[in-house]
Amino acid sequence: MIKGFKDFISQGNVMDLAVAVIIGAAFGKVVDALVEAVLMPAIAMLVGTPNFDEWLVFGSIKVGVLLTAIVNFLLIAAAVYFCIVMPMNKMIERRNRKLGIDPEAEAVDPQVQLLTEIRDALNGTAQGSSGDHVAR
């Protein structure tokens, strides 16, 4: 039982996920600090409200809390995309070019390839016959 758990934990996907969660949590704190200390005050200068959390609709509905969460999410998503995803894609693209791997060459699913061969064989048989084919 312990060996199975050890094998499960040592798989590449599990370790990658663990690293991603840890880095994501740390990166989230950095982006939160950026949002709270730099961007929200800049937005507040434009709008005139220092904190969106205090915006109320109909007297008691705190729409500002949702607005702040949406701004935080969009900024985190943009930061992750521009700081992690784009550089990683460029690095993979450079590595593939160096190794001579063509990203445009799509891998054909073996089932699709087999079905295509069957279809082509049936079309060849149907076109080659004169119409007087007798089933045996």
Image (tube, rainbow, N blue to C red):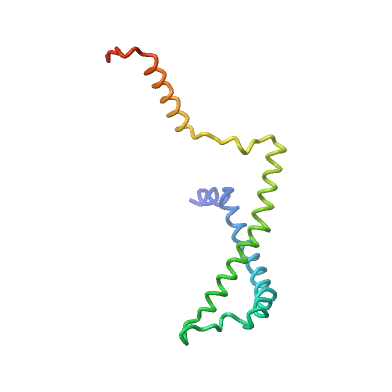
**Image vertical order of residue 14 relative to residue 44, above or below:** above
Q: Residue at x 63, y 58 (%)?
A: 81
Report whether 105 appears left or right of 42: left
Residue 51 in which image quadrant: bottom right
Residue 62 rendering spot, x and y as whole percentages: 50, 81
Q: Nearer the viewer, residue 109 or 49?
A: 49
Q: Residue at x 64, y 36 (%)?
A: 102
**Image vertical order of residue 97 relative to residue 42, above or below:** above
* Numbered marks: total: 0
Q: Residue at x 51, y 78 (%)?
A: 63
**Image vertical order of residue 25 relative to residue 9, above or below:** below
Residue 61 rendering spot, x and y as whole percentages: 47, 82
Report whether 46 appears left or right of 119: right
Quadrant location of the C terminus in the rendered image: top left
Q: Residue at x 56, y 52 (%)?
A: 14
Residue 30 rendering spot, x and y as whole percentages: 67, 68
Residue 86 rendering spot, x and y as whole percentages: 66, 53
Q: Nearer the viewer, residue 96 or 40?
A: 40
Residue 37 in which image quadrant: bottom right
Report whether 62 appears left or right of 44: left
